[in-house]
Amino acid sequence: MGAFRFDAVEIPPDAERLRGEVRAFLAEEMPNYPAHVRAGSWMRLEPEFSRKLAAKGWVGMAWSKAYGGHERSFLERYVVMEELLSAGAPVGAHWIADRQSAPTLLKFGTEAQKQDIVPRIARGEAFFCIGMSEPDSGSDLAATRARAEKTAMGWRLNGTKLWTTGAHIAHYMIGLFRTSTESKHGGLTQFLIPMKTPGLTVRPIRDLTGEAHFNECAFVDVELPPDAVVGGEGQGWGQVTAELAFERSGPERFLSSMRLIVEMIRAIGPDPDSRQAVAIGRLTAHLVTLRRMSLSVAGMLARGEDPALEAAVVKDVGAVFEQDIPGIAANLLDAEPSMDAAKTYERVLAELTMLAPSFSLRGGTREILRGIIARGLGLR
Amino acid sequence: MSETRAILEDTCAKLFARFEEPAVLRRVEETGDCAEVWAAVAEQGLDQIFSGGSDDPWRDACVVLKACGRHVLPAPLAETLMAGAVLGEAAPEGPLTLAAPAQSELTVGHDGNLTGRLDRVAWGGAARHVVAEAVGRAVVLPVSSARLHTDRTISREPRDTLLFIDAKPVGSAPRDGQPTAIGALMRAAQMAGCIEAVLAMTVQYARDRQQFGKPIGSFQAIQHQLAILGGHAAAASRVVDAAFDRIAATNASPEVLLNEAAFTKIRCGEAAGVAASIAHQTHGAIGFTDEHRLHYFTRRLWSWRSEFGSEAHWSAILGRQVAATGADAYWPMVTAAG
């Protein structure tokens, strides 16, 4: 019954044991991380931290051992992800490669691509960025104009990719390029692009937080060999759609403001007034519900089902929740956001107040998600 | 969902659909007489889930409670089931109902008889017995021994006052059943089912209703409102399903009952408000008429939202508990809640 499928999921005891291991590891590895640094979580890129996680076997968890993976279940992976995110671990360096680039290569890549690159991702040695958005192609992804032309040697790429998170530290990009103008959706192809290829320049873009999380990537006559294509020529649209299901389905889509909830509870203390108690209780009910929805989506992935619609629901509801929190947090304690690291609560409040607008932009805007949900309801 | 529960849901859908007609709903709302509906429900044994009628009573009850909401069943089946959850094997024959402890005042005489009043009892006059709280136990009183003042809420379901003078209880059970929590879970599950129905009805209306030469559902402004409604419907349904799963898995431990009552009543109550608002906005003036069936659903959502503790009531309980446990125990608490 109902328009969506959110089935029951039980986390197996093995995965719960793993949760304890992750907590112990994080207690050991990040005792001195200040709260405002934790608030950044998967927006913070620390290659060294990513390699430590890889050494624990927590990168590439669900992939085949033949490609350096660990053949753990999707739910075990989910448990590790949510523990890392809720602790505010700086997981940004490997996050994209682990979440979607390697799964894309494993699903659509050539045997050579899989053997060459996926094991390095699992070891925390190869980081990825996603080349989808462009100056004139944001939500309208199929309007992609960056082009790849066939040459005698392979392919020549020209154009600009924009808002490319982590491009400044990534070793590779999987980029979406136009290989034909005959059909809007049919003329797109994904390419595997080493970031050191001549002709590719990365320019960091400072965002409103004052830091540079994303970049502009300019391609001027970038030459790639014939085997740089990922999947089929002209199959890019379908592949990207599958990739976005991975991008949208994880616990990072409702845990972004977790650090602020925790610091708010700390600042309020054990004896809240009734307004504070009501607000904390309400947020907790929402958080527990979102986690239950998100786990259902993980269960669908584990069973090999397509959770694109349900993932869009969780991401949309989750982003509204995450974005409400800074305003609630400021009001409950009559607090003013501050950049002074000595004022823990006010500093975390500042960080998340500034980051919040991105929550309903990255990984598909609110408007795109609501369109997907409306289609799922039979309105399109 | 297991196959047996899918069959149960189907049984409810077929049976309850007979009483979902506005003519039937209106008649029961006007007279308070649900005898015909109750007879049909009892004939199927749906009232027996907690009295030996099911191997997995909490999960089965979840299906039936959501169906009661989805089809706005005009009879105290939800109340009978949850009174059964409080009493277990001690439950007498239905229909039963459940008094909210916050609206109950009973004192005990030396002979163990009870005197006092129970206010706003759902289907009080239609029930055979009422379960109430007295001296730290759940007691069963025959409605026939009460003086009855009939009343209605905006759902136009009966919310009656029962006055007892020196009345003899016919049964009792330990109070770990937590009547307020069980009542909250009942209303939350009904709301989750009702919101699903409101979503389906509103989507259908948006596909059918033409303005500016096309279905209003083809306008992005309407699509996005329905997407928001869809998100709330999904959240309400998921939190309720998981709650009843968890209660079943922990043998209805009092602590889990209390937490799940809070999670579900808070989340479903908020969803109910949004759902009713978007449904009415989408339906326009016709949805505001007595003739249209939408109000049978939305009036119940508004009424159920306030019963057995509002969102604020449960949020304050949960929030105090979280604050007392402390910031560093917060995430472990969330994961332990499942």
Image (cartoon, grey):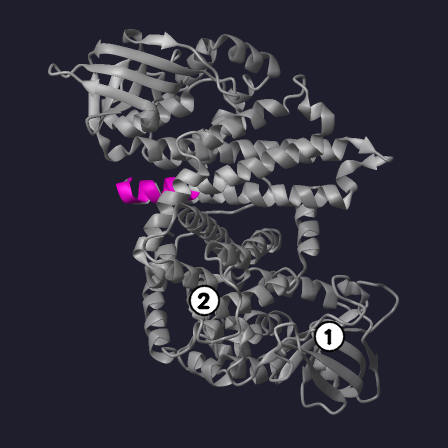
Q: Position of residue A119 (x, y in %)?
A: 52, 82
**Element type at mark 1:** strand
Q: CA distance from mark 1 to mark 2?
A: 33 Å
User: Mark 2 Cα within 10 Å, few/some/many (few <14, many 20+)?
Assistant: many
**Element type at mark 2:** helix
Residue B244 painted magenta: no
Return the residue nearer the eye: B17 or A319.
Answer: A319
- Give the chain of mark 2: A
Q: Nearer the viewer, mark 1 or mark 2?
A: 2
- The disc, 1 or 2, on the residue closer to the chain's N-terminal end is 1
Q: Position of residue A197 (x, y in %)?
A: 71, 90
Instruction: Give the answer, above or below, for where A260 lies relative to B209.
Output: below
| Residue occupying image coordinates x 33% and y 28% | B102
Residue B193 appears in the figure: yes
> Which residue is labeled 2 in the image?
A345
Left or right: A217 in relation to A91:
right
| Residue occupying image coordinates x 39% and y 11% | B125
Instruction: Tell me where the magenta segment starts and ends, as one range.
Output: B252-263
> Do marks 1 and 2 share a chain?
yes
Q: Residue B4: which disc?
A: none
| Residue occupying image coordinates x 46% and y 31% | B306
User: Mark 1 Cα within 10 Å, few/some/many (few <14, many 20+)?
Assistant: many
Q: Residue A162: which disc?
A: 1
